[in-house]
Image: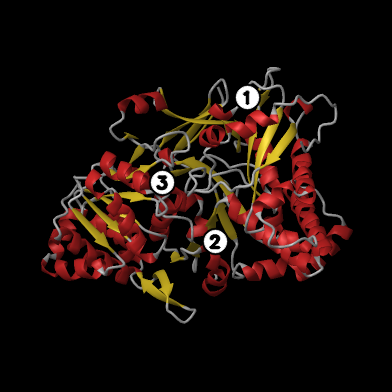
Amino acid sequence: MVQFEVPAIVPADPQANITDLLASRVKQTPTLALFAVPDGSGGWRDITAADFEREVIRLAKGFVAAGIEPGDKVGFLARTTYEWSLVDFALFYAGAIMVPVYETSSPKQIQWILSDSGAIACLVESAEHVDRLAEVRDEVPLVRKTWSMAAGDLDTLRADGASVSDEEIQRRRNLAIGADIATLIYTSGSTGRPKGCVLTHSNFVELCRNSAKALSEVVATPGASTLLFITTAHVFARFISILNVHGGVKTGHEPDTRQLLPALGSFKPTYLLAVPRVFEKVYNSAEQKAEAGGKGKIFRAAAHAAVEHSTLLQDGKKVPLGLKLKFRLFDRLVYSKLRTAMGGNVQYAVSGSAPLGPRLGHFFHSLGVTILEGYGLTETTAPATVNLATKSKIGTVGPVLPGVGIRLGEDGEIEVRGINVFKEYWRNPEATAEAFNDGWFRTGDIGSFDSEGFLTITGRKKEILVTAGGKNVAPAALEDPIRANPIVGQVVVVGDQKPFIAALVTLDSEMLPTWLANNDMPADLSLSDAAKDPRVRAEVQKAIDTANAAVSRAESIRKFTILSTEWTEASGHLTPKMSIKRNVILSDFAVHVDELYSVPVTTTNVPLGG
């Protein structure tokens, strides 16, 4: 059995809770800018560590005055804004337990999370959220109080809390110890009904303290800053937001990803947190913009040079003089412009939730942005492994973090134990027992280690397809390169117990109009018409041919169909972190899958667009 385990590099403190991270930060650097908020004129206003704690305590007093007791669970439904972190720490200081709800959740999802968790109150951001909660209000009788940020209820809470003493807040914030529950975060539900993960204070405290040391070049350097735009209801951004408080990183927020580029330009972060789809969008948008300006060939040549240059450097090989000269030229013509678009100061980007792929990793590396791809789940408080500034290998998810152990089962399943592993599934002892193997959390993911301890994820255990011919196929190996194409929205590879591998493909409605215009086609072509257009199909076929080139013939995609619809979170086919709900898709589009196999493939030619 392959196993890598790294001892913690910071001594554990079983008595510490998450509030100690903020209190310690204030004691060390009270005047350090810990947050920044839009000032209304395109700039940003800094909020110091001491000012943030004062605001936290004021709001915590409001929760106490409203009757929230230590250990009470409070639902929170909001976008990624400064107020998210404010409410998070205010609840910690009041001794309460936050139950985050994705701001895109449906009324039924809200009802399930609030009722299953036993939440006794719920705070929402917008009038739309109020309406969604109202739809199921009668189905959550335990919820005694509801507040709306849009209605000014944060100000009301602060005003009502004026009579609560500082001593009471200090008493409450010190009640929890490391083993106590800090938060209940529900899984995204990609494989069934969401389960509540019990994450403790120690999960966050010890992981933050050890990760800050391991990632010191990213979060512990003077002037470090980041702009969060991934939902903070997800454990990935939640962990980073708490890590930033501990590390003294200035954090801004941009809830509207359509305004991301302007926000990056004004905030100028030193590192980013993103999922692979964001990096794909940045690359594809730049490529299509260059194409529209008649500079598509230059961009593609620059991208090829960037990947080749970075690959040679990673492999320790000498870069030929000709490539060096091309690289310098493209740096001036292409790379520098993309760096400027991202604010000009980004040195690192932490990526997770899905495989990034070597091509994008090498491309951004040549821009001067080192993408630190990592791996983790809600059950591991986000990261279990991550590439480090001092120890990084593109195409992997990095080495094991300090305080964490990973081993691979006989079938390659990744199992984790350590400071980051959750306590249990809330009120679900059967699922908890099934999730652990001799104290190790069974992730359900398949992976492999290289000789230096870098982990590579090869797929989900339950998603491995076995063709009628007995060939095991990992869908992600085919789906990820196809999804990188600018007009592809999502793709699901099918073929379990079938004679060959096929695929369902959706188009990207955001990128499609630009691509159509660049190819002398009507930019307003509908998804339905585009799905049937031979030129669109040829472009998708090109993406499939690229994916097929990396696998054996038995694993290659023989047929595909382009759907006339999109898979979105609203349609129920994607999770809030943009992962596909494979089982739901296979059920909802079973007719399309059957059609792929209604006429057998008899040709020996693999690239079929049938």
Report the mark closest to the observer, 3 or 1.
Answer: 1
- The quarter in which the N terminus is drawn is top right
Viewer-proximal residue among 13 and 263 = 263
Q: Give how far across and how far down residue 351 sits, in percent.
A: 56, 50
Ranked by sequence position, the earlier of labels 3 and 2 is 3
- Residue shown at 82%/64% (left/top)? 298
Residue receiving disc 3: 207
Q: Amino acid at mark 2?
A: Tyr
- Residue shown at 50%/46% (left/top)? 571
Say if mark 3 contacts mark 1, CB within 8 Å. Answer: no
Q: Quadrant of residue 78?
A: bottom left
**10 Å neighbourhood of mark 1: few (<14), some, or many (≥20)?**
some
> Label 3's element?
helix
Q: CA distance from mark 3 to mark 1?
A: 39 Å
Residue receiving disc 2: 271
Residue receiving disc 1: 496
**10 Å neighbourhood of mark 2: few (<14), some, or many (≥20)?**
many
Ranked by sequence position, the earlier of labels 3 and 1 is 3
> Label 1's element?
loop
Q: Amino acid at mark 1?
A: Asp
Q: Quadrant of residue 141?
A: top left
Q: Quadrant of residue 490?
A: top right
Report the mark closest to the observer, 2 or 1.
Answer: 1
